[in-house]
Amino acid sequence: MLNTTKHRAQLVGKAGLAILFASAFSAPAAANAGVVLVTIAFPFAVVDWRSLVRQPVVMALLAYVIYLIALTVVLSITRPEGTNLHWSDPWDWLQLALFIPVAFFVQANSEDLGRLLLFCILGLIIGALWRLDWAGLLHSPQAYFYTKRDGYGFHPNEFALFSGTALLGMVLLRRRWWAGSPVRTLLWIACLLLLLQAFLVTKSRGPWFSILATIGFVFILSHHHRDGSINLPQTRISRYAVAILVLAVFAATQGQMIASRLLAEIPIIQDIASGKQEYLTTSSFALRWNAQIFGVESWLQRPLTGWGPKTSQSLMKASGNPKLQYRLGGFITHLHNTYLELLVQTGAIGLILAGVLIALLLRGLVLAFRADRLAVDLYLFLLGAFVFLLLFSLFEYRSTGRDWRFYWILLAGTASSFSLSAGKATDSGSSIAGKSG
């Protein structure tokens, strides 16, 4: 009976996993259903709870969860001036822990993971095409591409994170999905161009800079492994040349828009650099600059524990600082920097605990790769995705939103699956593939 229950839980969890990956960026209701299935099946499928809890990633997560709950309890009683803390405020942060059930059912299976990631990227493309402003595009393509910021149903900066990660996957996992025939190559180029166009239409400068730095990191890392004992799959130079040529022509047609977007804030940056005190609240850069100055000042008042979950906006409103308003009476909603938000909300202790968790996730990937349990293309993609996310977090804060939560659950769950499998916390009868494709 026990084995039957665990087998059924495995089937339910796997089904929920497929639904979650396929619909995370196209159908939120279905994605939520997938999360529910995975979460419900998880306690019935675990074979060895003691081994699971002893995993470094799980222990780091538990430490952060306990700290967050304890911090909320203490601050709800003491009520620091300027905050409006509620018992429900840490809930959005606590939901990020759902990556553990996802990791359990991914089970570090490279072959299955490759298919799940393909479903995820195709779901993102289909969702973007479904939500695209076709009326605006057909009415005035020039206005759409050069003046409109589109997030395809998401906030533009958030969609830039999703589409940028998908671009990394399309390039680094190409041979896993698209190699083998001219038709597949054409489909790959079409999907790549759709994602690149969507990424550029977000007009999100922070993600633009972040993806360039990430590409440099992945390029250096890939050449390091190519020169060593592990060789990356080789592709004909002519195919690379054609792809590069197509992308160069494509980028050239967007050059005016890109240059305009990048240079728009230069006068404001010069004013800030020269020490001028009057900044336009209509300037995105000035608002971010003022918000981060305010964030540092707020954190220094409570450096160890911060002010509590989701308190940054209430602090800005309580300050009445006009430099934090994008319109009269309208305060910006966050500090536009995830690390600063963590410091303000949870203090240096919270940031350190979060940093330890991220470091353990990355360590698990490196160890799995060195132990030949993680294929090189997936290794480069997952590391690249984390680097992109960490750089993106310098410019934006979306960590408690529903869509970012899906992104985190998938990325962290995939990465931590290799740590859990190494610790034998998953079903011993499950297949753990090393290299695939």
Image (cartoon, rainbow, N blue to C red):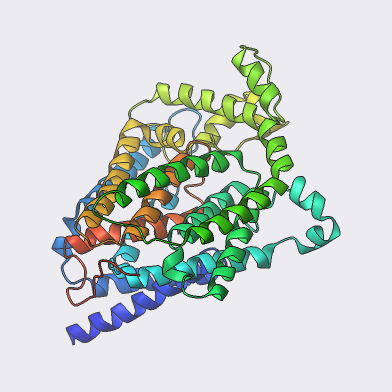
* Location of residue 145 in the rendering, given as x and y in whole percent from the top left corner: 75, 50
> Taking 139 as reference, is 7 above or below it?
below
Task: Identify which residue is drawn at 46% across, 59% down.
Answer: 169
Number of numbered discs overlaid on the protein picture? 0
**One can see residue 230 in this view:** yes
Task: Identify which residue is drawn at 39% across, 39% down.
Answer: 76
Q: In which quadrant of the rendered view does residue 433 lie?
A: bottom left
Q: Nearer the viewer, residue 368 or 81?
A: 368
In this picture, residue 337 sits left or right of residue 103: right
* Location of residue 213 in the rendering, given as x and y in whole percent from the top left corner: 47, 40
> Taking 297 as reference, is 100 above or below it?
below
Q: Quadrant of the N terminus?
A: bottom left
Q: In which quadrant of the rendered view does residue 108 lie?
A: bottom left
* Location of residue 122 in the rendering, given as x and y in whole percent from the top left corner: 54, 68
Task: Identify which residue is drawn at 71% across, 31% down.
Answer: 264
Furthest toward the top, the residue is 275
Q: In which quadrant of the rendered view does residue 416 lie?
A: bottom left
Q: Nearer the viewer, residue 261 or 100?
A: 261
**One can see residue 32 in this view:** no
Q: Quadrant of the C terminus?
A: bottom left
Task: Identify which residue is drawn at 54% across, 69% down.
Answer: 185
* Location of residue 362 in the rendering, given as x and y in whole percent from the top left corner: 30, 48
